[in-house]
């Protein structure tokens, strides 16, 4: 990514701060922490929530196998237009709320997904919507699948922890701002 692209993405994040919750894309270190526990060889379908400028999307595509599917839900149409330009046949960019996973999976004829990776700013989203998104994420995950979420605080840890059989917390200082990763197994 060029410096000009990074600058443009940061401007878009600042403009949409209320829904993005950040002013800079995630660092490579945070992305490695977020995706580190995924077994990509056996993952046929991954859902991504809140891809923004696509830094996590591209890291996922770099690791996913040729016949797999990545479905990325993004509300911001400027980011959606940018994501479509990635031009990878495995990637389905959906301009819809993260709460509509089931409807989109039905359209694509997919019953359950292997993993869900979320960059959603849960702390800024209404509690009711967070609950709907988390329940939808869990119910569409296969048994043993992972829900991976990063956050800049532990605000929603109490919502996530009781929903999954195993939850591991990781932390990295090497991000602006420093971030926690919730690694949740269904
Ligand atoms: C923090 S940015 C993440 C950008 C990128 N994935 C990263 O890690 O740098 C969060 C993104 O979530 C999107 N978003 C917020 N609420 C959403 C929702 N309910 N459904 C889908 N996307 C949402 C925002 O538009 C924003 O692009």
Image (cartoon, grey):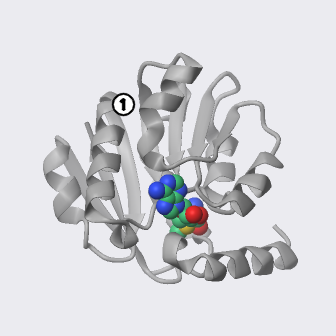
Between 36 and 127, the residue placed more toward the observer is 127
Please state which of residues 106 and 173 is positioned toward the viewer in this rendering.
106
Rendered image quadrant of residue 185: top left
Name the residue rendered at 86%, 78% in the picture: 4
Whether residue 36 appears in this view of the structure is no
The residue depicted at 63 percent of the width and 61 percent of the height is 52
Q: Quadrant of the N terminus?
A: bottom right
Which residue ends up furthest to the left in the rendered image?
162
Pick the front one: 15 or 156: 15
Q: Quadrant of residue 3?
A: bottom right
| Ligand 1 located in image quadrant | bottom right
Residue 69 drawn above or below residue 127: above
* Residue 42 in picture, x, y percent from top left: 50, 25
Q: On the image, numbered disc 1 is attached to which residue?
A: 140
Q: Position of residue 184 (x, y in %)?
A: 29, 47
Position in image of residue 110 (x %, y %): 50, 19
Picture mark count: 1
Q: Quadrant of the C terminus?
A: top left
* Residue at 53% from the left image edge and 30% from the top image edge: 104
Where 36 sits versus 125, above or below?
above
Residue found at x 78% / y 37%: 88
Disc 1 secondary structure class: loop
Res 92 seen here: yes
| Left or right of residue 60: residue 112 | left
Q: Callout 1: few (<14), some (14-19), or many (20+) C-alpha neighbours within 10 Å?
A: many
Which percent across, then down, holds residue 137? Answer: 35, 41
As drawn, 9 above or below 39:
below
Whether residue 3 sits left or right of residue 39 in the image: it is right
């Amino acid at each position: 990514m060029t410096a000009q692209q990074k600058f443009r993405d940061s401007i878009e994040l600042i403009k949409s701060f209320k829904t993005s919750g950040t002013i800079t894309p995630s660092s490579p270190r945070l992305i490695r922490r977020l995706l580190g526990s995924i077994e990509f060889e056996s993952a046929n379908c991954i859902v991504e929530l809140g891809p923004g400028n696509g830094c996590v999307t591209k890291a996922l595509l770099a690791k996913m196998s040729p016949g797999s599917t990545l479905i990325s839900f993004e509300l911001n149409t400027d980011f959606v237009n940018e994501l479509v330009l990635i031009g990878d046949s495995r990637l389905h960019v959906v301009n819809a709320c993260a709460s509509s996973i089931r409807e989109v999976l039905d359209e694509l004829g997919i019953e359950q997904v292997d993993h869900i990776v979320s960059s959603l700013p849960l702390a800024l989203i209404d509690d009711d919507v967070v609950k709907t998104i988390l329940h939808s994420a869990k119910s569409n995950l296969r048994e043993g699948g992972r829900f991976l979420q990063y956050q800049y605080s532990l605000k929603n840890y109490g919502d996530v922890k009781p929903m999954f059989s195993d939850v591991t917390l990781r932390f990295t200082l090497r991000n602006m701002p420093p971030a926690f990763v919730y690694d949740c197994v269904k």
